[in-house]
Image: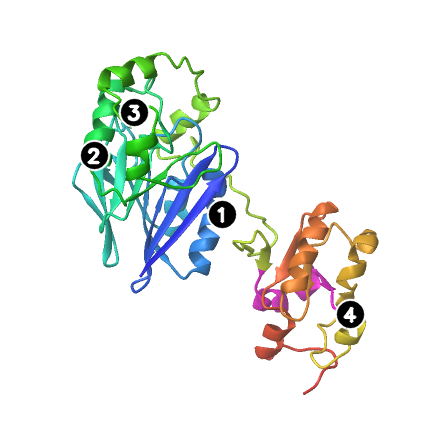
Amino acid sequence: MLIFRQLFDKNSFTYTYLLGDSKSREAVIIDTVYEQSTRDCSLIDELGLQLIHVVDTHCHADHVTGAWLMKHHLDAKINISRHAGVEGADNGLVDGDHIKFGSRYLQVRETPGHTSGCVTYVLDDETMAFTGDALLVRGCGRTDFQQGSPSMLYQSIKTKILTLPNSTKIYPAHDYDGVTVTSVAEEKEFNPRVGGQSSQKDFVLYMNSLGLPHPGKIDVALPANLNCGRPKNGRITDELPMWGPLKKTFAGVWEIDAEWVLENLSEVLLLDVREHDEFEGSLGHIVNAKQIALGSLANRVGEIDTQTPVVTVCRSGARSAQAIFLLQQAGVTKAANLSGGMLRWRDRGYPVVGGAS
């Protein structure tokens, strides 16, 4: 069975796609965004996947790719068209190549025209195609920079994408209206640029009359993406707190493992957000923990020492995760949720004050 997730970056309107093989747990990710790498790594971890390949549909001009960062964190191979002019990739792709993950693969179809190095990735059974900016929902990518060519793009769309089965679902790299997917049949009929009876001449004249401004981030994105998103100094700049070995969940909550907390009890403020009867109840509580029920936290946040890292605790980790958001809203930046809460703490046999034996 195929594992599939469609992710979105609201700043660049970019869709990122994660595909995994449910048996081998090997996975591939398409069109990552640098600022979303922590989110993507968290999802891959939570789904129990091993990222084998990170691929881009082309050299983007509106955001910095997360390819280099994903390779750094997860040791995945970077893949992009051989014609993209990019340095630092592990594999330069050409038409007909297969990107394998477990028993599945993506077939590479060269679809230049938006840029000279655009490719479309087609799933092995041709049920899904990831078209980058070559073909969008009721539109297509611009053709006025990065060796773009309207006549070339028209031929790419007509011969490499719209020749797929009518039922093939098309997933673009961007959509500015929140539309997530289309199909070959829909674009054949309804795409105002290449659908219906539109000719190559019609398309070329249409594209040459757009008069679009250059992407706002092109001066930053393009140089970085020509090096797979690797910063000039090679230093990681994504958000990683330094006070402990934190991990960010896909839900956006920073968590920390119970073992580290046990070994560093004197270095953190334990904030138990259970009700008082639970705090003194059968699960007990961790020594020196400060008890403030979640319902009272917003009004008592002034009691929290903002200079000391805060670890929030509850029964299972659910209420204490919500406490993290409340603390962040109040300006408490050094805060993490105790992963698994008191249930996991007790399950590991760690010491408590009170509680049932």
SS for callout 2: helix
Q: Is residue 339 magenta?
A: no
Distance Cα–Cα, label 2 vs label 1:
34 Å
Distance Cα–Cα, label 1 vs label 3:
28 Å
Residue 312 x %, y %: 68, 61
SS for callout 3: loop
Whether label 2 touches label 3, CB < 8 Å = no
Q: Is residue 273 magenta?
A: yes
* Circle 4 residue: 275
* Circle 3 residue: 115
Q: Which mark is residue 160?
A: 2
Which sits in the foreground, 202 or 22? 202
Distance Cα–Cα, label 2 vs label 4:
61 Å
- Residue 192 occupies which quadrant of the picture? top left
* Circle 1 residue: 38
Residue 51 x %, y %: 35, 53
The mark closer to the camera, 2 or 1, is 2
